[in-house]
Image (cartoon, rainbow, N blue to C red):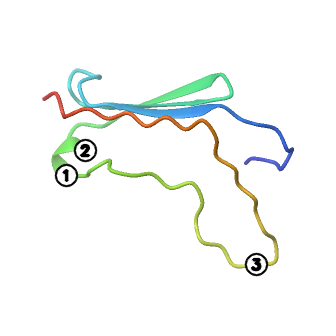
Amino acid sequence: ILRPDGKSHDWSIDYDPGANGGGGRITVQFDGKEQTLDLRPGHKKSGATFDRFGILNCQSGGHYVEVYLDDLEYTARPDEE
């Protein structure tokens, strides 16, 4: 949960298809903390494509959210398999 504190937050998401013995790994960093997730065997074979990401989901209710994105950097390279 991100509390609205008015502060900037540094974050990144990295997908390495060759990590985890070729099984794939997702690494997320947020404000200096890192979490990794090794994909389970067979996940890559299901045919998922990482071609975008979501920041907010659609919500109903009475509150609004202001989101500012700055200094974004997008990198991509062909699948190395």
Residue 3 versus residue 46: which sits nearer the camera?
A: 3
Judge from the rendering whether residue 81 lies leftward or rightward of residue 11; answer left or right: left
- Residue that appears at 21% across and 42% down: 44
* Tag of residue 46: 1
- Residue that appears at 19% across and 52% down: 47
Q: Residues within 10 Å of mark 2 (few under 14, many from 20)?
A: few
**Badges 1 and 2: C-beta atoms under 8 Å apart?**
yes
Q: Which residue is mark 2?
A: 43
Q: Looking at the picture, does residue 69 appear above or below residue 41?
A: below
Residue 12 versus residue 44: which sits nearer the camera?
A: 12
> Horizontal and vertical percent for residue 19?
29, 22
Query: Alpha carbon of mark 3 to alpha carbon of mark 2: how far?
Result: 35 Å
- Residue that appears at 81% across and 71% down: 63
Residue 11, quarter of picture: top right
Q: Which residue is mark 3?
A: 61
- Depth-wise, is mark 3 or mark 2 nearer the camera? 3
Q: Residue furthest left?
A: 81
Residue type at mark 2 is His
Query: Alpha carbon of mark 1 to alpha carbon of mark 2: how far?
Result: 5 Å
- Depth-wise, is mark 1 or mark 3 nearer the camera? 3
Q: Residue furthest right?
A: 5
Q: Earlier in the sequence, mark 1 or mark 3?
A: 1
Residue type at mark 1 is Ser
Q: Quadrant of the C terminus?
A: top left
> Horizontal and vertical percent for residue 72?
55, 38
> Horizontal and vertical percent for residue 22?
20, 25
Judge from the rendering whether residue 72 lies leftward or rightward of residue 22; answer left or right: right
Residue type at mark 3 is Gly
Residue 21, quarter of picture: top left
Q: Earlier in the sequence, mark 3 or mark 2?
A: 2
- Residue that appears at 69% across and 50% down: 68
